[in-house]
């Protein structure tokens, strides 16, 4: 109940803050902007071509921009199309290592070898940045070179497509509309989110690069940075469209991997952060808040399972009242539904209509209940030190990426 109450309070505070935004930061002149290398890691995904094309269209000094596609594909036909795209667009360099060892962070480390930029912009293949995205993202780094990096906000482009995309959008909105804006204002720093992030290269190299095989290399690296007293800026008004999983199966796999990766990062990096004299107490509390949502998930699953067992084993043999059970369920949802309320309210704040919010609530009480199991499975596997596979998700961008490869 305490965790749920915290989410109620955080949601109210975040929505109140959205009504009083800070003034936009000034955009530096071209001469003051840092050099940037764009990393687009991909594995059998033509969606990377859409992302790369938009990066070619950036309103950014050409002599300060390098674009790289890290192609780990096992499908030769997809690699051929990526090569064709690069031949037509000399501004794009293809990095290839002949396998997928270490997953995404292994790919990023391989691209790091040929990276010329002072900063690295990491974009997953389904992200579609606007023309002025990089110029605005790089502004805080140009104004304050001591920053470890800058994180932009995510907005889901296919939010209303299915119950799964609505559910995935709800989760992303809680992070980017509620949690990160509050952490920025309260602790002065946030955590990286894995994409639409600008990372300072020299600091990354000094920390030994990305952790190979990490399922959430972003959180893993963030905890290392925060333990060293570094700071990450968050631009809540700078958004980058992306995709949410289209099917329940993909959603379950994505969230299980995220849960696993965050828990492994906490297990391997959390103690050093807590013991660090360089990290502020507020930063440590902010990290606990960021990761504490997974504790609520485990409690919700336990509550749901126990409630179901109580009804099955007691009714109708002992005269259990369905009305009473329904009331108890509604009360428990209210007491533990802080995360759901955060998802619904953040949906409204980002332009969801009443109908979409209602569908999100329906999704939460259908596939959302199944999702609890898979998230808990990921958490338990992480706690037990069991391995986790990297699951590829279906992306709409792969279909339009084919058109980009053909020059359509």
Image (spheres, rainbow, N blue to C red):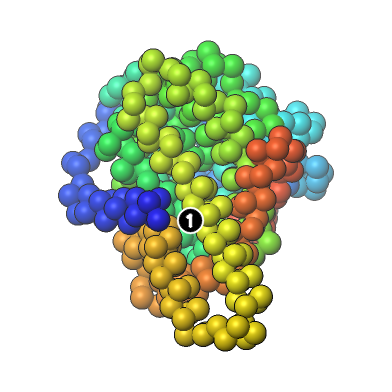
- The quadrant in which the N terminus is found is bottom left
Looking at the picture, tell me which residue is in the foreground, 159 or 321.
321
Q: From this viewpoint, is residue 319 visible? A: yes
With respect to residue 218, does 306 lie above or below? Answer: below
Q: Left of 112 or right of it: where is 30?
A: left
Within 10 Å of the Cα at label 1, are there few (<14), some (14-19), or many (20+) other Cα atoms? many
With respect to residue 153, does 67 lie above or below? Answer: above
Looking at the picture, tell me which residue is in the foreground, 157 or 344.
344
From this viewpoint, which residue is outermost toward the top? 206
Q: From this viewpoint, is residue 245 visible? A: no
Which residue is labeled 1 in the image? 171
Residue 92 image offset from top left, x and y in percent: 59, 34
With respect to residue 161, does 104 lie above or below? Answer: above
Question: What residue is shown at x 21% (from left), y 54% (from top)?
Answer: 16
From this viewpoint, which residue is outermost toward the front? 318
Residue 379 image offset from top left, x and y in percent: 62, 45
- The quadrant in which the C terminus is found is bottom right
């Amino acid at each position: 109940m305490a965790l749920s109450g915290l989410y109620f309070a955080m949601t109210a505070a975040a929505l109140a803050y959205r009504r009083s935004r800070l003034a936009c930061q000034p955009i530096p002149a071209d001469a003051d902007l840092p050099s940037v290398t764009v990393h687009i890691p991909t594995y059998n995904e033509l969606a990377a071509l859409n992302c790369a094309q938009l990066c070619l269209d950036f309103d950014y000094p050409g002599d300060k921009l390098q674009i790289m596609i890290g192609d780990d594909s096992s499908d030769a036909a997809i690699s051929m199309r990526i090569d064709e795209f690069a031949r037509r667009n000399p501004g794009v360099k293809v990095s290839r290592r002949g396998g997928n060892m270490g997953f995404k962070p292994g790919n990023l480390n391989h691209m790091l070898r040929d990276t010329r930029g002072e900063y690295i912009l990491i974009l997953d293949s389904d992200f579609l940045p606007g023309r002025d995205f990089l110029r605005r993202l790089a502004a805080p780094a140009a104004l304050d070179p001591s920053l470890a990096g800058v994180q932009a906000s995510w907005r889901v482009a296919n939010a209303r497509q299915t119950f799964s995309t609505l559910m995935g959008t709800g989760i992303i909105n809680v992070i980017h509309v509620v949690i990160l804006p509050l952490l920025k204002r309260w602790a002065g720093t946030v955590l990286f989110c894995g994409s639409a992030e600008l990372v300072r290269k020299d600091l990354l190299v000094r920390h030994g690069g990305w952790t190979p095989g990490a399922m959430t290399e972003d959180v893993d690296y963030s905890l290392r940075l925060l333990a060293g007293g570094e700071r990450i800026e968050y631009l809540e008004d700078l958004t980058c469209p992306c995709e949410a999983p289209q099917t329940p199966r993909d959603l379950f796999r994505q969230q299980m991997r995220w849960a696993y990766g965050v828990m492994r990062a906490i297990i391997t990096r959390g103690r050093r952060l807590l013991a660090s004299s360089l990290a502020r107490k507020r930063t440590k509390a902010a990290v606990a808040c960021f990761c504490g949502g997974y504790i609520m998930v485990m409690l919700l699953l336990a509550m749901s399972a126990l409630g179901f067992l109580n009804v099955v084993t007691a009714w109708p043999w002992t005269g259990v009242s369905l009305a009473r059970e329904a009331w108890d369920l509604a009360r428990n949802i209210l007491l533990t539904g802080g995360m759901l309320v955060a998802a619904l309210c953040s949906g409204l704040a980002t332009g969801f209509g009443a109908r979409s919010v209602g569908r999100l609530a329906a999704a939460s009480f259908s596939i959302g209940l199944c999702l609890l199991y898979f998230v808990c499975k990921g958490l338990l596997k992480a706690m037990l030190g069991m391995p986790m596979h990297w699951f590829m998700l279906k992306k709409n961008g792969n279909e339009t990426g084919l058109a980009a490869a053909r020059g359509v």
